[in-house]
Amino acid sequence: MSDKSAAPHADVAALSFEKALGELEQIVQKLEGGNVPLEDSIAIYERGEALKKRCEALLRDAEARVQKITLAADGSPAGTTPLDAG
C-alpha cells in the first residue's frame, strides 16, 4: 500500500486530462452508490476536487491554445486569431 498521507493529491498534477477525468468519473460513481463509509467518502470527495481542478486547468490551457484560422479574400489561410475573438 502506498503512503499518500504526505501529499495525498500530488500525483494529480501529473495526470493527463483523460486519466484525471476517468478517475473523477469513478469517484462520482462510488459516491453516488452510497456504499462508502463517511470517512472514506470525505477522502474520495477531496481527491475528486483535486481531479476536477486538474481537469479545469488542462481545459483552460487547451482553450488558450486553440486558434481559429482566418481566411484571406481568395480563401487561402491568412493567419490565426484567438478562438474567442469573434
Image: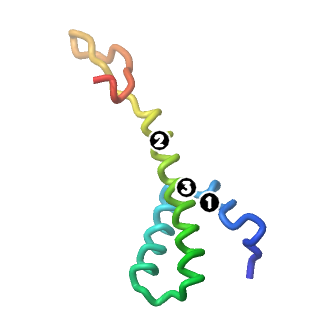
Q: Residue at x 46, y 33 (%)?
A: 65
Left or right: 21, with 13 as reference point: left
Where residue 47 sits in the image (x, y, percent)? 57, 67
Mark 2 or 3, nearer chain start:
3
Quadrant where the C terminus lies? top left
Dot 3, crowdedness within 10 Å: few (<14), some or many (≥20)?
few
Circle 3: residue type: Ser
Mark 2 or 1, nearer chain start:
1
Give the image quarter of residue 75.
Answer: top left
Dot 1, crowdedness within 10 Å: few (<14), some or many (≥20)?
some
Which residue is labeled 1 in the image?
Answer: 12
Looking at the image, is 12 positioned above or below residue 60?
Answer: below
Between 48 and 22, the one lying in front of the other is 48
Left or right: 66, with 54 as reference point: left
Where residue 55 sits in the image (x, y, percent)? 49, 53
Which residue is labeled 3 in the image?
Answer: 16
Q: CA distance from mark 1 to mark 3?
A: 9 Å
